[in-house]
Image (cartoon, rainbow, N blue to C red):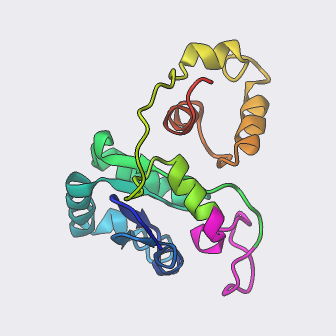
Amino acid sequence: MLHIREAIVVEGRYDKNTLSQVVDTLILETGGFRSGFQIFKDPEKMILLDRAARRRGLVVFTDSDGAGFVIRNRIKGVIPAQYLKHAYIPDIYGKERRKRRPGREGKLGVEGMSTRVLVEALRRGGATFLGEAEAPSTRRPVTKADLFSAGLSGTPEASSRRAALLKALDLPERLSPNAMLEVLNALYGYE
């Protein structure tokens, strides 16, 4: 079992159960989509997430479907960015074992990912694995000008190029250009 400093927020109890078999840390649930987006209706839940984020940091680890991005954006809008890290699972199509049919978008969620994919996503998201030395970052950040010069923004083909890059990097297809820039800098850097 891997030990992580930050708390992790996931959508629902099945995500929490899957992740708790891989990492030892505080794992909080938002209540997910089916329960009416509790995160929007329950101010106490947001207070709890904010408190956890300020004390130990918070990794937002939602599904890569539309509902997951709505929840992720809600958290980003309420909790200061310096306390947040974002882990993204790749777009993998299929259905979870417990479900009769795939979700609306046909993508696997956190609960459907393998241990290897979950750990890799947490590492790329910047989670602090306790007992491992942290290497100082010397990465050059990616800028909007870099995206433009690479043809990833500002051209008619930019959308399809971004989609190809996101697919090659196993990142969700729903990332906007600004969100993609944020993720590229958090996970990779210019090189």
- Number of marks in the rendered image: 0
The C terminus, quarter of image: top right
Q: Does residue 71 appear to the left or right of 101 in the view shown?
A: left
Percent of width and height locating residue 166 = 70, 40
Residue at 44% of width from left, 38% of height from top?
Answer: 135
Percent of width and height locating residue 42 = 27, 69
- Considering depth in this image, is 59 or 191 the residue closer to the camera? 191
> Is residue 150 positioned above or below 33 on the image?
above
Residue at 50% of width from left, 70% of height from top?
Answer: 33
> Is residue 87 positioned above or below 104 on the image?
above
- Considering depth in this image, is 179 or 191 the residue closer to the camera? 191
Q: Quadrant of residue 45?
A: bottom left
- Considering depth in this image, is 95 or 77 the residue closer to the camera? 95
Task: State which region is magenta.
Answer: 95-116
Q: Quadrant of residue 149?
A: top right
Determine if the magenta segment contains residue 100.
Answer: yes
Q: Does residue 165 appear to the left or right of 129 in the view shown?
A: right
Q: Does residue 3 appear to the left or right of 33 in the view shown?
A: left
Percent of width and height locating residue 127 = 43, 52
Determine if the magenta segment contains residue 171.
Answer: no
Residue at 20% of width from left, 59% of height from top?
Answer: 51
**Principal SS element in the magenta part?**
loop
Residue at 79% of width from left, 32% of height from top?
Answer: 160
Percent of width and height locating residue 184 = 57, 34
